[in-house]
């Protein structure tokens, strides 16, 4: 056995080859006097930047078409200080609805009430104090009971309870601002996963019923995404991707058209379930698009907001 003879290899002229990267797509140096729009234009038109620009374009188009732009968020979105950005987008018409897991309710409620959240679990779990803040558990469970009584979803019920209290930080509370601006806010619980569920005031029937009402409301919102809507999954690796996939199934099972829409997953680690249940499966075979954007929320979501507001079609 001898080393293969390479003298017969066929080559071609470099100039004749189609290529995926060219200098027209390169970044430009940033100047200290650049406006935000000028900064965005100077980013390289390659890979994630190209995806971010296209996603922002689709979000602007959804708004123009009157189609839903649904933001599915996990608690980390609140803990990284992004509520003011989402509230601003909400008031400008780029947030049609918010879907959340249970941790969002905990952290946003605490921000509204006292202006801080995210306890030191390592320091408190040994004493059994983790999650035992009285006010947090009481208002979450009161909202569930009152929502159950009034046949409304948990997200609306909690927004209503908080709004009535006129908390000092209502202006940067997603729950308060969604309620005040009549933006649907759905909450999707995993019973036992959130701190309020082990408080004495917890009522499993009320929690389950109001969360199920929110699931049905979420299905109605997803139904309206046909032909141009957008769903964003931000920081939920399990619960919301599963909820979204089931909602897509419900809508199609009931005979409604659901195609030609856009999905995206934002996280600093790309997990199997969001990419499968949000980015790939729902749009398979349809004339839609799915995007996976990797990075820290506190960087990526402000960039997305900037691209939505200052980008070009």
Image (cartoon, grey):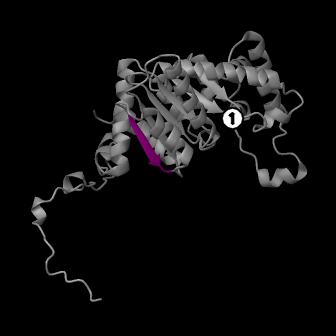
Measured as percent of width and height from the top left, residue 250 is found at 55, 22
**How many C-alpha atoms fall within 10 Å of the one at disc 1: few (<14), some, or many (≥20)?**
many
Q: How many marks?
A: 1
Q: Residue furthest bottom?
A: 2
Quadrant of the drawing holding the C terminus: top left
Residue 139 sits above or below residue 277 on the image: above
Q: Position of residue 83 (x, y in %)?
A: 57, 34
Q: Residue at x 69, y 31 (%)?
A: 105
Q: Does the segment drawn in magenta span residue 49?
A: no
Q: Check the image and name the residue furthest to the top.
A: 150
Q: Which residues are magenta?
A: 289-295
Residue at point 62%, 43% (across, down) = 76
Residue 106 in the image, given as x and y percentages of width and height: 72, 34
In the image, residue 304 lies at what x, y percent?
43, 39
Residue identified by numbered label 1: 111
Of residues 126 and 242, the one drawn nearer to the viewer in this rendering: 242
Which residue is at 40% across, 28% downward?
Answer: 261
> Which quarter of the figure has residue 285?
top left
Judge from the rendering whether residue 276 lies leftward or rightward of residue 154; answer left or right: left
Q: In what element is the residue under mark 1?
A: helix
What secondary structure predominates along the stretch shown in magenta? Answer: strand
Q: Residue at x 10, y 59 (%)?
A: 16
Can residue 83 be seen here?
A: no
Q: Nearer the viewer, residue 230 or 313?
A: 230
Q: Quadrant of the N terminus?
A: bottom left
Farthest residue, direction front: 1
Q: Quadrant of residue 220?
A: top right
């Amino acid at each position: 056995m001898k080393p293969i003879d390479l003298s017969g290899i066929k080559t071609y002229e470099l100039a004749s080859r189609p290529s995926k990267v060219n200098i027209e797509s390169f970044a430009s140096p940033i100047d200290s006097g650049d406006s935000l729009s000028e900064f965005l234009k100077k980013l390289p038109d390659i890979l994630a930047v190209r995806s971010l620009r296209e996603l922002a374009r689709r979000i602007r188009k959804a708004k123009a078409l009157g189609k839903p732009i649904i933001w599915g968020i996990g608690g980390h979105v609140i803990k990284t200080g992004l509520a003011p950005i989402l509230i601003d987008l909400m008031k400008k018409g780029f947030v049609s609805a918010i879907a959340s897991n249970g941790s969002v309710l905990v952290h946003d409620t605490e921000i509204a009430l006292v202006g801080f959240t995210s306890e030191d679990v390592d320091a408190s779990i040994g004493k059994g104090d983790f999650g035992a803040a009285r006010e947090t558990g009481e208002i979450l469970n009161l909202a569930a009971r009152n929502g159950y009584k009034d046949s409304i979803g948990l997200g609306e019920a909690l927004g209503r309870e908080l709004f009535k209290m006129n908390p000092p930080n209502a202006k940067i509370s997603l729950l308060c601002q969604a309620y005040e601006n009549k933006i649907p806010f759905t909450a999707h619980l995993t019973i036992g996963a959130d701190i309020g569920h082990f408080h004495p005031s917890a009522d499993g029937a009320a929690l389950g019923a109001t969360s199920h009402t929110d699931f049905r409301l979420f299905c109605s919102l997803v139904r309206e995404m046909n032909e141009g809507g957008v769903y964003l999954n931000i920081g939920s690796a399990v619960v919301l991707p599963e909820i979204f996939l089931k909602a897509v199934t419900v809508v199609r099972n009931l005979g409604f058209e659901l195609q030609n829409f856009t999905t995206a997953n934002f996280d600093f680690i790309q997990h199997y379930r969001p990419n499968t249940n949000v980015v790939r499966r729902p749009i398979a075979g349809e004339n839609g698009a799915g995007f996976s954007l990797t990075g820290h929320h506190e960087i990526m979501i402000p960039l997305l907001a900037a691209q939505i507001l200052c980008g070009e079609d």
